[in-house]
Amino acid sequence: MVLLEVIGHAAAALAFIVVIVLTVRRRQRLARTLSRNATIAYRSILGVSGVVALIHASYALESLVFNRTVSSPDPLYMALHSPALVALSVVLLFLVSVKLVAERSPRPRRILAIGAHPDDLEIACGATLAKMRDAGHSIYAMILTCGEAGGDPAIRLREAHHGARFLDVNEVEVLNFNDTELADQVNEITRAIEARIRTYQPDIILTHSAHDQHQDHLAVHQATLRAARNHSAILCYESPSVTRDFQPTFFVDIDGYLDVKIESVRTHADQRRKPYVSPERVRGIAVFRGGQAKTRYAEGFEVVRALASAVGDI
Ligand SMILES: [Zn+2]
């Protein structure tokens, strides 16, 4: 009987610990999938689960050390075994799993997203990428520099992978072109993009805009257009350095993904002092573009070409 009690409580403690460890390991995915408030609520419940695990562990220890069952079942002991608590846990897990399953697109697309620097994609179209990924589209990210002119390249490289993991993109590749000098390497960049187009066969290509005053962004735009000269769908996203001539006519509704975008931008902690990465600025642009698109929040794109059958239902 005592052995049974030790095993029971130890198993319960272990189960809670496993759930907590798995959640901590998947915290980025959770934060990406749940809203900020839901994530906080879920983490609070996990914190309580941690306490419950400790209590179960202490019961197991008490039974083991004193070789007896838990002396007088107190209210806490009873609560831990109540069907209500078990039911609550099941409902919670069910709700989280429902939230984890997004509506899948019947026509999955392949998207090649090209950025000059490690944080360009998250800042410009992080919500669109996350939304498309959740809908079952495949995302291949190509970043041309480690961003060494704007910070420690090793940190920025790590953060580029961190951001891509957070957005759940299928593949991310960070190339080693020289930051701030891309205008001198347009031919090489064009060849690099051509190679990725051959490899990934994307339906849609996302790149920088022609109306961008950052010389690297402009170089990537030009290289993309040359490399994708036979491609049917090219959309240009909005970086913080776009000029007033940036005039989007294609919008992606990002309601439900604005917090995801803000979190994805936060993965680039090395750049947190830049004013354009503040949640206020990211939110403000989403509201403004949403107003133009007659919806709540949106990301805007300039269209180079958009063949309807290539773009599909993104
Ligand atoms: Zn950039």
Image (spheres, grey):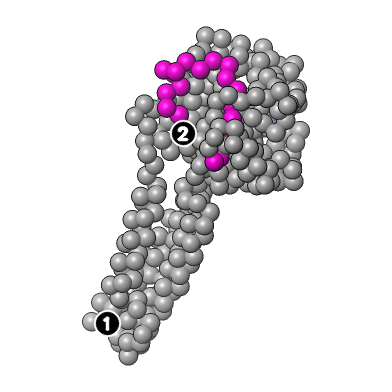
Residue at position x 52%, y 9% from top?
230
For the C terminus, the image quarter is top left
Residue at position x 40%, y 34% from top?
136
Residue 117 seen in the figure: no
Sequence-first tag of 1 and 2: 1
For discs 1 and 2, the disc positioned in front in the rendered view: 2
Which is more toward the observer, 218 or 251?
A: 251
Mark linked to residue 153: none
Percent position (x, y) of residue 179?
A: 73, 27
Residue 9 sits above or below residue 147 on the image: below
Q: Secondary structure at mark 2?
A: helix
Quadrant of the image occupied by residue 180: top right
Query: Could you tell whether 87 is left or right of 273 in the image?
Result: left
Is residue 305 located in the magenta-colored stretch of the structure?
A: yes
Query: Could you tell whether 115 is left or right of 100 in the image?
Result: right
Is residue 123 located in the magenta-colored stretch of the structure?
A: no
Q: Secondary structure at mark 1?
A: helix
Indicate the amino acid at tag 2. Answer: Met
Residue stretch rendered in magenta on the structure: 296-314
Mark linked to residue 2: 1
Circle 2 is placed at which residue position?
Answer: 132
| Label 1 – label 2 distance at C-alpha | 54 Å
